[in-house]
Image (cartoon, rainbow, N blue to C red):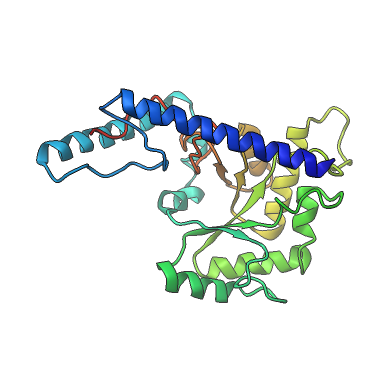
């Protein structure tokens, strides 16, 4: 039954992605001024003509202006203005690393070997998203937090791994899978606690235990302020990275995956 559920979720994901790609393609055809391309990036000017470049640069500046305006409108300063989060402003390169990555684990944790590889291949990284949950989750009754704690070496081993990455100046994020509902959920909470409250607490507790720096909100278009506030109650200044939407809304990092809620109101390229 769990396998069927996962397949259905993947199918819906694929349909949604294809649908949004079609929407973007049609928008690009109709609007010849400013478009967001299908790679979720801002393409360069189409040629070296000065007029073309100036139009392109005007759109870049408009994008920045719009983003800063919404940053103020949504009152999300709490997620940016903490001095302990200054590092997010220069966090440009972050691989999503599966926990079974052979450069990272081969009977023992080898973060230095992993760092040596990424330094050789593309000059290093600013942070790493350590991913031990999906697609393994659901193979047994362990929830996402138990799966992370049950990695080789347990919490102590993971804390040592995080400390090793920190020595390289690399921050560490964990995954948060809000759709994790079919596993054995934490039970030591009052009956009136919502899943969101429980998850926020479990996530902050785990991040605190291993000295990580934040989390990626898998499939999430935005992350509610309760996650940031719960982190604060544990003495944490969390980097919060929703998969979708844009970085000035309910999070201070993002993937901007357009299959969730793409920023269609933002002009980003003149052709």
Residue 95 visible, this orientation = yes
Q: Residue at x 59, y 38 (%)?
A: 14
Number of callouts: 0
Query: Nearest the camera: 58 or 194?
Result: 58
Determine if residue 266 is in view: no
Q: In which quarter of the image is residue 220?
A: top right
Placement of 136 over or under 266, stated as above or below = below
Residue 27, percent across and down?
Answer: 37, 26
The reply, left or right, for residue 72 in relation to residue 244 is left
Q: Please state which of residues 48 and 254 is positioned toward the viewer in this rendering.
A: 48
Q: Residue at x 45, y 27 (%)?
A: 23
Picture quarter with the N terminus: top right
- Residue at horizontal 48 percent and vertical 69 percent from the top: 118
Quadrant the C terminus occupies = top left
Is residue 137 or residue 110 the one in the foreground? 137
- Left or right position of 186 against 259: right
Q: Is residue 127 above or below residue 115?
A: above
Position of residue 17 measured from the top left corner of the image (x, y, whole percent): 54, 35
Q: Where is residue 199 in the image (x, y as percent from the top left)?
A: 74, 40
**Residue 60: x, y in percent?**
27, 37
Residue depicted at x 41% and y 39%:
38
């Amino acid at each position: 039954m769990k396998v069927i559920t996962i397949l259905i979720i993947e199918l819906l994901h694929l349909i949604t992605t294809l649908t949004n790609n079609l929407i973007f393609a049609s928008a690009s055809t109709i609007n010849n001024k400013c478009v967001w391309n299908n790679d979720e990036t801002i393409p360069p000017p189409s040629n070296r003509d000065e007029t073309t470049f100036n139009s392109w640069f005007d759109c870049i500046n408009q994008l920045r202006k719009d983003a800063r305006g919404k940053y103020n409108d949504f009152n999300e300063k709490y997620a940016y203005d903490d001095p302990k989060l200054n590092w997010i402003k220069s966090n440009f390169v972050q691989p999503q690393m599966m926990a079974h990555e052979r450069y990272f684990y081969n009977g023992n944790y080898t973060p230095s070997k992993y760092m040596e590889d990424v330094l050789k291949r593309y000059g290093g990284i600013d942070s790493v998203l350590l991913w031990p949950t999906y697609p393994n989750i659901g193979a047994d009754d362990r929830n996402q937090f138990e799966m992370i704690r049950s990695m080789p070496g347990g919490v102590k081993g993971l804390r040592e791994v995080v400390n090793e990455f920190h020595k390289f100046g690399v921050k560490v994020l964990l995954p948060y899978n809000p759709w994790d509902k079919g596993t054995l959920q934490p039970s030591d909470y009052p009956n009136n606690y919502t899943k969101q409250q429980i998850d926020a607490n479990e996530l902050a507790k785990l991040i605190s235990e291993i000295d990580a720096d934040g989390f990626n909100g898998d499939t999430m278009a935005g992350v509610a302020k309760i996650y940031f506030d719960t982190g604060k109650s544990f003495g944490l200044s969390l980097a919060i990275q929703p998969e979708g939407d844009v970085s000035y809304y309910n999070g201070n990092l993002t993937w901007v995956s357009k299959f969730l809620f793409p920023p269609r109101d933002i002009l980003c390229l003149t052709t």
